Amino acid sequence: MLDAEKLREDFPLLRESKVIYFDNACTTQKPKQVVDAIVEYYTKYAACAGRSLHKLATKTTEEFEKAREKVAKFINAKKSKEIVWTKNTTEAINLVANSFKFEKGDKVLTTNLEHSSGLLPWQRLAKKGVISLDFVLCNKEGELSIEDFEDKIDEKTKLVSVIFASNVTGTVSPLKEIIKIAHENGALVLADGAQAAPHFPVDVRKLDLDFMGFSAHKMVGPTGIGCLYGKEDLLRELSPFILGGETIKDADLRSYEPEDIPHRLEGGIQNYAGAIGFGAAVDYLTKIGMKNIEDYEKELAKLLIEGLLEVPNLALIGPKDWRKKNALVSFNIKGIEPQDLAIMLDENNIAVRSGMHCAYPFHKFIGENKGSVRASLYFYNTKEEIGIFIEKLKEIAKTLG
């Protein structure tokens, strides 16, 4: 059983501020346990991993690789070497896009629901003539149809790149079915897991998923650290697009011998503090239990959506059925610009996001060319906060009516 009020005591900002923080899809708050792990690295054993042999470096290497093991276990990866450190999900997707061995005529299939990070790398490759790019279009509520994937995936499809959970509609893609269809046609699947891994249990082996990127800062971890999960044999086939320190075993003036994975894909000094903080974040979430988080957030989603549907002149983006969503909603109120509404809420200590949410094609697809307001919740948000939020929206809507 998840006790949100008790957990809030671990978060300095939530404990000390009156702000209602509903911008968790952008970044989450950090508990003391994560901050302490980062501070401990910087104050007690700050050094480089994998290089020097002194005690500080040895400790850094141990904690750095221990964090990798924690993240691997969190998504049930087979081995810790299947986790490659990146800055974030964006870099993870770009790592695949720039390192994957495409051949002329290969097709990448993606959707109109993607975050810019899951779209622009493929656009660039298509413009260079490296790949052909095709799309599955979601419906107006942000739901993807398996039949459309069956129609689009063919023998030319090399890779399917798909968002696991939408950062605009909160809908969760039928990823297991997509993977099955892709594999039957000899294609691989890369999932943008930024809005999935923080909110419900993800088992990459049960899914038979080939690649997935996700970010620590969306799951109570520090900014500037994320990872790419990839099956061991597939990671070995990637051609590193960043070369330098720690990526090689040996070199002379005209050639080099690459290091094994994951280090061959991690050029240069790494974000050791970030990785260690990521590990601490995984410890924190694991202690709560990802199923407990999922169940509690479903309760929040139900309350949130039911409340929003009572607000006059409010247009909800995505499904009205809370069972189909994470605790994330985007919406607009007729007669007010999204940015203006976000500012009005901020004046009442309610933090939301407004704009296109890095999903320009989808907003244009549904006719919301100025974007939307997004409220995204996490396990430390409360039902009381939702009540205050809904009442404030009702007040704003009435003043406009």
Image (cartoon, helix red, strand yellow):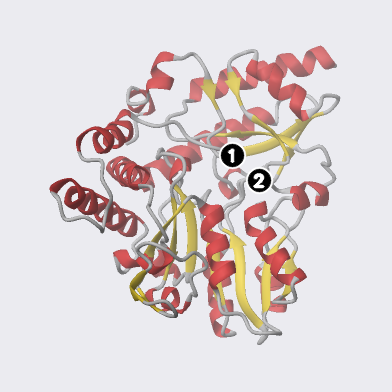
Query: Residue at (74%, 68%) from the top-left corner?
Result: 135
Q: Is residue 32 left or right of residue 85?
A: left
Front residue (pair 105, 313): 105
Judged from the image, the secondary structure of the residue bearing numbered disc 1 is strand
- Locate the C terminus by quadrant: top right
Front residue (pair 296, 234): 234
Q: Amino acid at mark 1?
A: Leu
Q: Is residue 250 left or right of residue 66?
A: right
Which residue is tagged 1?
Answer: 328
Label 2, label 1: how many angstroms apart (C-alpha)? 7 Å
Q: Is residue 258 above or below residue 283?
A: below
Residue 356 visible here: yes
Q: Is residue 370 above or below residue 94?
A: above
Q: Amino acid at mark 2?
A: Thr
Q: Position of residue 89 (x, y in %)?
A: 52, 53
Which residue is tagged 2?
Answer: 169
